[in-house]
Image (spheres, rainbow, N blue to C red):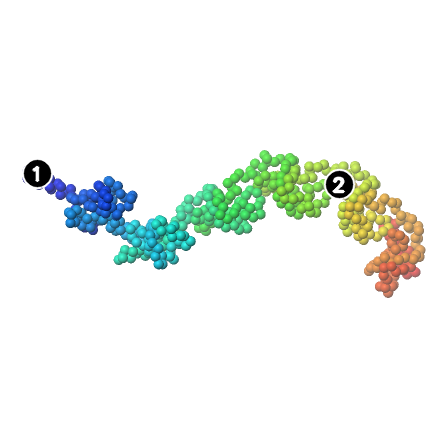
Amino acid sequence: MTKELSAMEELYNQSIKILKEGQIIKGRIVSIKAKEVLVDVGFKSEGIVSISQFSKEDLGVGKELDFFIDCIEDDSGMIGLSRDKAIRIQGWDKIVKNADEGTLVEGRPVKKVKGGFLIDVVGIEGFLPTSLSSFRGLLDKNILNHPFKFKIIKVNNLRHSIILSHREAMQKAKEEAKEKLWQDLKVGGIYSGTVKAITDFGAFVDLGGVDGLLYITDMSWSKISHPSEIVALADKIDVVILKLDKESGKVSLGLKQRFPDPWADIETKYNVGSKVKGKVVNILPYGVFVELEKGIEGLIHVSEISWTKKVNNLGEMFAIQDTVEVQVLNIDKESRKISLSLKQLEQNPWLEAEAKYPQGTKVQGKIRGFATYGVFVELDNSLEGMVHISDISWTRRVAHPQDIFKKGQKVEVVVLSVDSQNRRIALGLKQLEPNPWPEIAAKYPLDTVIETEVVNVNDFGVFVKIDEDLEGLVYASEIDKDNLTQLKSGDKLKVKVIKVDIEQAKIGLSAKI
């Protein structure tokens, strides 16, 4: 019997762990009371720990936790344990390791003090200087007892105290996120980003730590004048990665690439010769751009506006957002150009012009404009002809057509010629009357002396009025220089006829009688 008791005692002693004061061991909660917790650590006696040393998450019968051995046996014969000391010691070891490795730790600001905040990091008290907090703009209620990441920048092993930096932690977290993002970014992938800046040439988009450039040409298949037509600051947009260069840190983005290219099947949508409707989106001196659909624009060149009218100001004929019907002339898929026409929707009046206006036909017209060399006359079917300055009068010398006619004035003219190919109609006013020059030649034979009135004096001679609407030229060589310099308009001058040119409709005169 004695041997059996001795054997049992030996077996019991072997089952008891060999424990030392200052050691951290595992313990299992076996009972929870109002103020204390009973913990079994596999020793001959159990330990009692104040319930205040446990968090709500740690409390639970059967849970295994780490405990610090204060003493092997206290006054009541039980092992002395501490949950707080175990947390602090393990926390300090972890803090030293984190400080050495430069990894971030999580802590909670528990109190605002002069110059900064006291931070609880796994039971260790740390100090966060205001200069390293990055809490500017935040209220205390949004700081205290809230978890934040910190970087340990100084460790005091004697005092078991640390100095922390939230600013450096944020920077490190940002760099780590940026590095991870660079690893995740793939050409062709679609990513969400935020517009952070807009320039004339594009927009910068924050992809979450990496900035990319969205060029204006990659924003829309349609032509746009400025990036602000598509995006605004702080907009959340999905973009496609077009190019990546990690060494230079450049990322090229695309927005329009998320949608099908409207030019891909252009031939199936628009046929040459077909009629289509579109919206005027731009007006330039050389033509009008028409949007046929989003991303597809065509050009009506100024030469394709009208068969007959000379268009000087397209802004007077069109306005932005006007809806127009046009005909497709040509499609250049490679260059992304479509040529359009307005006039092709109408019958070309020049095809019938020669038959309608044979030479010698008298027609009514309206003066539409002037040039230094003649008068433009609009005929009844919108065709336009020109009366050259030499065909205004048989005898009158015309310097400026607008001195005789007014814009909008109705006139009768004679068709002199029609050139349908070059779209020109030559008209005449003087041809409405017989050529008077044979009669003039008979009335004023050579050597006839006549009294005239000075009309104009210039370097090559003097123009004089012979009769109503009939002028002649006194050559500079046929008048004394002294007389030439003294003459003025309205002066009387006796001259002699020395030349009559019926073909050129001119009379040459001499003041040397």
The residues bearing labels 1 and 2 have C-alpha atoms spaced at a distance of 135 Å
For the point 51% across and 43% down, which residue is it?
Answer: 255
Crowding near the residue tagged with mark 1, few <14, some 14–19, many ≥20 C-alpha atoms within 10 Å: few
What percent of the width, then of the height, locates residue 71? 18, 50
- Image position of 427 (left or right of 444): left
Specify which label sits upstream in the sequence, 1 or 2.
1
Q: Nearer the viewer, mark 1 or mark 2?
A: 1
Q: Secondary structure at mark 1?
A: helix
For the point 77% across and 49% down, which residue is it?
Answer: 370
For the point 59% across and 40% down, which residue is it?
Answer: 296
* Residue furthest to the front: 34
Crowding near the residue tagged with mark 2, few <14, some 14–19, many ≥20 C-alpha atoms within 10 Å: some
Query: Splitting the image into 4 quarters, where does residue 328 fall?
Result: top right
161 or 341: nearer the viewer: 161
Q: Say which amino acid is labelled 1.
A: Glu
* Residue furthest to the left: 2
Q: Say which amino acid is labelled 2.
A: Ser
Q: Secondary structure at mark 2?
A: loop
- Image position of 205 (left or right of 65): right
For the point 61% across and 39% down, which residue is it?
Answer: 292
Query: Splitting the image into 4 quarters, where does residue 346 fall?
Result: top right
Quarter in which the C terminus is drawn: bottom right
471 or 103: nearer the viewer: 103
Res. 266 visible in picture: yes
Res. 204 visible in picture: no
Residue assigned mark 2: 382
Quarter in which the N terminus is drawn: top left
- The numbered dot on residue 79 is none
380 or 310: nearer the viewer: 380
Residue assigned mark 1: 4
